Amino acid sequence: MRVGNTWYRSIWRENGTGHVSAIDQTKLPHAFEVFELACLNDAVRAIADMKVRGAPLIGATAAYGIALALAERDTQAALDTAARKLFAARPTAVNLRWALERMQRALATVPAGSRAQAAFDEADRICDQDAAVNEAIGDHALAWIRDKADRNGPVNVLTHCNAGWLATVDWGTALAPIYKAFDAGIDVHVWVDETRPRNQGAALTLWELMNHGVPCTLIVDNAGGHLMQRGQVDLCIVGSDRTTANGDVCNKIGTYLKALAAHDNGVPFYVALPCSTIDFSLADGARIPIEERGEAEVLTLPGATAGGFDRVNIAAPGARAANPAFDVTPARLVSGYATEHGAAARIDAVCGSPTAATAS
């Protein structure tokens, strides 16, 4: 998507050099910086430290991590070690496992000595396909917004966390239909949850939307229910880090509460996701591993200062904090799903088998 007058993807290979570059999302919105992934450990750290984040982008980064590992040492041991290290970087997003398994399948018949180039080529294909998949999601989910556009005033969409192009290779999932609507001339406005504790809504979603020119307003996480009670939210659209076979949706912590408020107020609650995010090995969300991140994310806040960037304490000295990164929204609270194959009320209607998910 566009940053200023330049079109960017969130991760790419540089023309000519072939070096892998990505946008450092920990520096946004205060600074736009690009960093290079030069080796396997760079990819592992980028995922673990959330320089790159969002389920599809994590998968794409892991694919390049495999390629970088093989470029350094093309052995089966190196491939196995790379897959193990990358998988351990963040356990919740199913795209990470999906991408690693796809890379291993693609390399299974490639002879040693040729696998690094084959791995880079496959990682490039994953990125190109992800951009195409997300644009298709936007096309299908656009109907949700169009359905609300037949009255005076803007269509007010509430979103949680960041499921825009920064969370994918391009376009995004939950934000893709918003970009499509805005580009089609539909009057649309977005309520952006701040999304504590890492503030991906404030730092990333708002930054994205503002760069594209989409009208948007930042709200605190607990304001969504209040706005719904007052009739100021027409629909909610979120992404997903893992969705189970029955349609339970694992997404950023706080998503479940938005779904409950939407259900209580008769507001449609939609999920936009690629089929690669569906985990058909799990019947429901009860067995999804929930990542527990460090206490410092809750006990401190980052921000821009006169001297650069810093974190400030917001709790009493010695305070402890719990920091589950995700929660699970039951399928019964979801009004509909949009994947690259279409939009429907049930997940199996738009991605009904593991084969369909693997193909995407």
Image: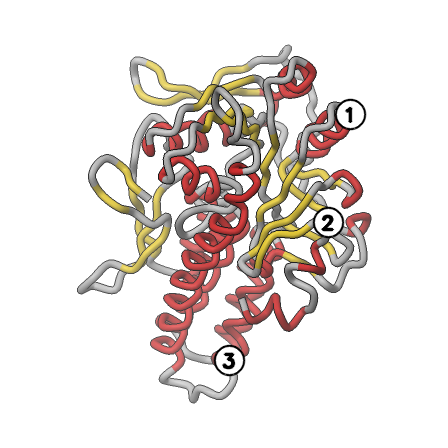
Residue carrying label 1: 264
Q: State the count of labels.
A: 3
Which amino acid type is marked by label 2?
Answer: Pro
**Seen in the image, is 338 located left or right of residue 202?**
right
Task: State the residue at coordinates (41%, 52%).
Answer: 169
Q: Image point 48% across, 20% down: which residue?
A: 153
Q: Residues within 10 Å of mark 2 (few under 14, many from 20)?
A: few
Give the image location of residue 45, x and y in percent: 46, 49
Query: Image height check: is 211 above or below 274?
Result: above
State the image coordinates of residue 113 (x, y, percent, origin top left). Answer: 37, 84
Left or right of 28 on screen, residue 264 = right
Q: Amino acid at mark 1?
A: Asp
Given the image, on which type of amino acid does mark 3 rest? Gln
Residue 157 x, y percent position in the rendering: 54, 29
User: Circle 2 — which element?
Assistant: loop
Which residue in the structure is indicated by mark 3?
76
- Side (left or right) of 316 relative to 78: right
Task: Confirm or deny contact between disc 1 and disc 2 (CB under 8 A).
Answer: no
Reading the chain from its start, which is encountered first: label 2 or label 3?
3
Q: Is residue 360 above or below residue 222?
A: below
Name the residue at 30% across, 17% down: 307
Q: Nearer the viewer, mark 1 or mark 2?
A: 1
